[in-house]
Structures are given as structure tokens and as C-alpha cells.
Amino acid sequence: MHELGIAQEIVDIIAEHAGSARVTRVVLEIGRNALILPDSIRFCFDLCSEGSAAEGAALEIVDVPARARCRDCGAELVLDQPFGLCNCGSADLQWLSGDEIRVKEMEIV
Ligand SMILES: [Zn+2]
């Protein structure tokens, strides 16, 4: 399960920023192309955050659509899945974003 490794990285990043403070809320941005299941990342986050500054923090997940540029006509597209067609009919897409996983916000006390 690759969500477990990702959750561990997220917890490490949070712990680093939080120092000795306690984290109450975390907003996570997950791109559509990252192919992460929100339920799975929640479960893993709870496991990994046990005993860390992030233990018990509420995890909010923001779904980020994938963006791509068509190599044929140069149009920019927003896609809900990691494949697609440009309006011009081309499938030759350059991905600009969509596979990112990042901590957007965190609240500490
Ligand atoms: Zn196109």
C-alpha cells in the first residue's frame, strides 16, 4: 500500500513544522493523478500520526484537478482523470500538474 509511505512522509513534514506544538487540523492537497484513495490516506495518517505532534489532528483532503497542455494546439485542459483528449482531438498531452501531494495548511495550538 503506497499510501502508508506517503502518510508517513506527511506526518514527518507536519512534525518538523510543528516542533513541540500540537497539530489540530491539516489540509492536504491531492492531485487527481496521484491516484490516492482519500479513505486509505486517512486510515494511514491515523496510524502514522500516533505518538507524533499530528496525533488526533483532523485531516481535510482537497481534491486538485489535473492540468495538461496539448502538444498539438497548445490549449490548456483541466481533467478529472489521468488521461484524456484535447478538444482538437489530440491525446498528446503534457501534464502540468495533478500528481502533487502537499500539506497546504496546518493549525497548531
Ligand atoms: Zn489540442
Image (cartoon, rainbow, N blue to C red):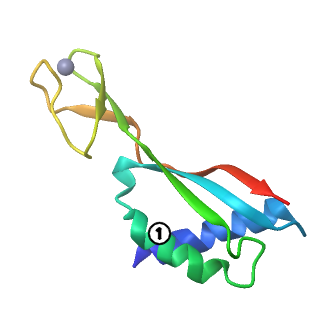
> Which quarter of the figure has residue 69?
top left
Q: Determine the residue positioned at 41% across, 69% down.
A: 39
Q: Element at badge 1?
A: helix
Q: Determine the residue positioned at 56% across, 71% down.
A: 7
In the drawing, does residue 64 fall left or right of residue 87?
Answer: right
Dot 1 alpha-carbon crowd within 10 angstroms: few under 14, some 14 to 19, many 20 or more: many
Q: Nearer the viewer, residue 22 or 83?
A: 22
Q: Is residue 37 above or below residue 53?
A: above
**Percent x, y of residue 94:** 32, 33
In the drawing, does residue 25 fall left or right of residue 69?
Answer: right
Q: Determine the residue positioned at 25% across, 24% down.
A: 70
Tag 1: residue type? Ile
**Percent x, y of residue 61:** 50, 54
**Percent x, y of residue 57:** 67, 67
| Ligand 1: quadrant of the figure | top left
In the drawing, does residue 9 fall left or right of residue 68?
Answer: right
In the drawing, does residue 108 fall left or right of residue 27?
Answer: right
Query: Which residue in the protein does label 1 denote?
Result: 41
Image quarter (top left, top right, bottom left or bottom right) of the N terminus? bottom left
> Which quarter of the figure has residue 49?
bottom right
